[in-house]
Amino acid sequence: MKTRTIVAAMLLLCGVLHAQTPTQQKADEKTLETVYAAREQADQFLDLAWDSELKKAIAGDSKAGELANKIDDDRKRQQRWEVSAWSLSNSALRPGESIESELGNGVVAVRGTIQTAISRGLPVPPSTAEPDQKIDKPAHCCVYMVKAPPEIRSRILVEGLRHDLKNFAAILQFDGKSAESDGFWVSWKSAWFDAQEVFCKYNQGAQFIDLNGEAQTCKTSSSVQSKPHD
């Protein structure tokens, strides 16, 4: 009975994934790029805010030091999880490719050839060969970014941005400010809901942690946790 349930769940997931047309997937990937930009901005702001708290700690504020250490530990754990959550396995690497570095956020830097870059649908990289030079072997021309599919990358961004929102809110609260009154925090929160919507579109029945730290289950696309209205 348990095996039948697992098989049924897998078939349901496959049906959801296959239901997304190439146009829909492109739109979802574009949404995730916007979320990624918000995540990058949040990380930059956290760097600055964390540095400010660290300076307070050096000046003798022990509570600021505790907060800075707590946030630093959380960000390091999150970074390790993101790298482990998805990577190109050896079977997914194409002939002539090798992993240059794991960047997190569902992105891996890959060193490859002109042919492998083109096969992944990337723009043709510039060639260093002379116009009339005959090339016998594929040239290891460049490093390019390979991104996780939307069903996986959305999960990574949902978790990563959730941690960023929590940490930045803690800093604001420590300084006597409200996160909900901070324009940047509110925009990142909106991006989190966009990522969560994409995640649930591809992963119906999967669980995620909401912004209140509570476990939620993705339902049908029409009943996922909706973005709050302004």
Image (cartoon, grey):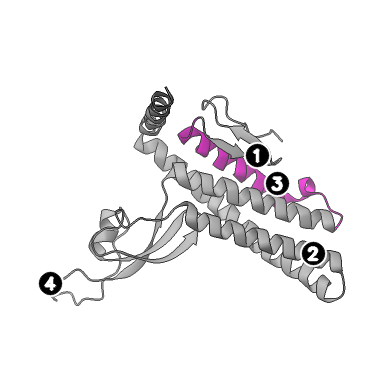
Residue 218: which quarter of the image? top right
Residue located 87% across and 55% down the image: 176
Amino acid type for the residue under numbered disc 3? Val
Residue located 42% across and 50% down the image: 148
Q: Callout 2 environment at 10 Å: few (<14), some (14 to 19), or many (20+)?
A: some
Q: Is residue 45 visible?
A: no
As drawn, the label of residue 66 is 2
Q: Earlier in the sequence, mark 1 or mark 4?
A: 4
Give the mark count. Answer: 4
Amino acid type for the residue under numbered disc 1? Asp
> In the rendered structure, does residue 78 fall within the stretch colored magenta?
no
Amino acid type for the residue under numbered disc 2? Glu
Residue located 33% across and 69% down the image: 142
- When the figure is inspected, residue 200 is found, relative to residue 153, above or below; the finding is above
Q: CA distance from mark 1 to mark 2?
A: 25 Å
Residue bearing mark 1: 210
Residue bearing mark 3: 186
> In the rendered structure, does residue 192 fall within the stretch colored magenta?
yes
| Mark closer to the observer (4, 3) | 4
Q: Earlier in the sequence, mark 1 or mark 2?
A: 2
Considering depth in this image, is 108 or 184 the residue closer to the camera? 108
Q: CA distance from mark 2 to mark 4?
A: 59 Å
As drawn, the label of residue 136 is 4
Find the magenta span and give its range: 175-204
Q: Callout 4 environment at 10 Å: few (<14), some (14 to 19), or many (20+)?
A: few
Q: Callout 1 environment at 10 Å: few (<14), some (14 to 19), or many (20+)?
A: some
Residue 27: which quarter of the image? top left
| Mark closer to the observer (1, 3) | 1
Q: Is residue 108 visible?
A: yes
